[in-house]
Amino acid sequence: MTTESDERGESKSTVNVGRRVFLGVAGLGALGVAFGNSVQNFLGDAFGSGLGGLLPGGDRFRIYSITGSYPKITRDKYRLKVSGLVDHPTTFTLAELQSMPKTSFTKAFQCVTGWRVPDVHWEGVKLSDILDRVGVQSGAVAVSFDSYDHADTESLSLDQARLHDVIVAYSMLGAPVTTEHGGPVRLYVAPMFGYKSLKWLSGIRVVDVVEPGFWEQNGYPVNGWLDGTTGPNNPDPGLT
Amino acid sequence: MSLIQAPAKSLQVLRFDRVQRGAHWVNALLFFSLMFTAIPLYFGSFFGVVFPRHLIEMIHLWSGLALPLPIIVSLIGPWGVAMRRDVRRINYWTHEEIRWMRTLGKSRLDADKFNPGQKLNAIFVGVSILVMLVTGAMLQWFRFFPVPWRSGATFVHDVFAYAIFFVVIGHIVMALTHREALRSIFKGSVSRSWAERHATRWLREEQSDRTRQ
């Protein structure tokens, strides 16, 4: 409290409301940074991700593209070329992928920058099933991925590629993968941050060395494990 | 002629000096830049539009980093006298003003240059700029922060963006419906009769300042 006198000589005490509101709102902001994640998870659990998607800051995808546009590939024209150290180099159509054993599960999509979409339904083919189909040769240690955007690349060690929740996905959120989400076919690497789940998958190359992908060349960890370590149940493939 | 003009001039009271007007419009320009670039960044997935995302990101980032500058520059230095005085007005409230705010304008008010609603708006926008700057920086340079903090910063940046959007829309609606007050952010002054109706205490202080000089 300070005291000022106006020109009539009356003493008027004043309150520094500015400081109070400032500290209050800044404090709310700080609490939001510290606990916003827990609040969002609680709201997501309590009301389901459908409502969460409507709330500001709710569970929503933020669409990133390296090139600034989305490659448009029709479902008929789509081809997945599998090559490299394999016994039978094969080019799959979408129908051929869909005729293979189907894997589906519901898992969150977690971006390395912080946003997260819980309870996303994924459906596709296990990457390990595709690798088994083409026959991986001895000497192979890793898998490299290419995108129809001709810009993004990714890689996984063979051990990582064979995890049960690493899939070549053609369905997402209960519908065919949309163009903006990387359709018709994208990668989904459940135990890692979103940047590992390459969009508009065009090619799989089995190789003898881990080739750091686009985001890794820009400073992201090659092993994008969600917990920031070598993964909960997975062996460290010896990469950084 | 001079007999007519001289009293006419004294019927005007300076509300915002050049520095304040300049700071306001640079600030407004940056706000619009931030809001318009935020729309595709935020809702891009809804519209499914193709746009040069990286360019828009850079405009958003630099506009955000520049946002505090007009305020800081207008506050410091010998040109910042009026601005500093107004910040003080906005921060320090009389008990009458607090009561007026609590009763949502129903109690008596010996109005200052800004009414308590305007003061609250200014304080909120001021602190929000800081919150947006800090959380925005956390999203840009996320590597230095643990993942739950990044999620929290995203959450806070989103919620505050909505709040600021509605507050600024409210600010613009109020401005457009109060033409004389609006004129003062372009031309600087308001009429004495406006001040007598809307800012009695301020007008008294301005007059006593002038008699002292």
Image (cartoon, rainbow, N blue to C red):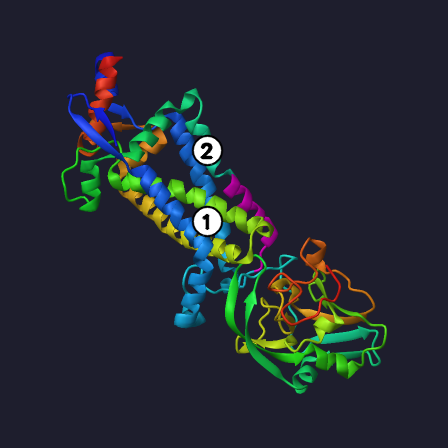
User: Can you tell which quarter of the image residue A200 is in?
Assistant: bottom right
Instruction: Determine crowd level at label 1: few under 14, some 14-19, many 20+ residues with C-alpha closer than 10 A.
Output: some
The secondary structure making up most of the magenta span is helix
Q: Which structural element holds mark 1? A: helix
**Residue sitting at 25 percent across and 39 percent down?**
B116
**Residue sitting at 43 percent across and 68 percent down?**
A44
Image coordinates for residue A81, horizontal then vertical, percent = 76, 74
User: Can you tell which quarter of the image residue A177 is in?
Assistant: bottom right
- Whether A77 is drawn above or below A192: the answer is below
Disc 1 chain ID: B
Residue bearing the label numbered 1: B35
Image coordinates for residue B63, horizontal then vertical, percent = 52, 42
- Check disc 2 and give the amino acid type: Pro
Image coordinates for residue A151, horizontal then vertical, percent = 71, 60
Cα gap from disc 1 to disc 2, whole angstroms? 18 Å
Range of magenta residues: B50-65
Q: Is residue A7 left or right of residue A215?
A: left
Query: Can you say which quadrant of the picture contains the N terminus of chain A?
Result: top left
Image coordinates for residue B65, horizontal then vertical, percent = 52, 40
- Whether A21 is drawn above or below A9: the answer is below
Circle nearer the viewer, 1 or 2: 2
Q: Magenta segment: does it hold A208? A: no
Disc 2 chain ID: B
Residue bearing the label numbered 2: B70
- Check disc 1 and give the amino acid type: Met
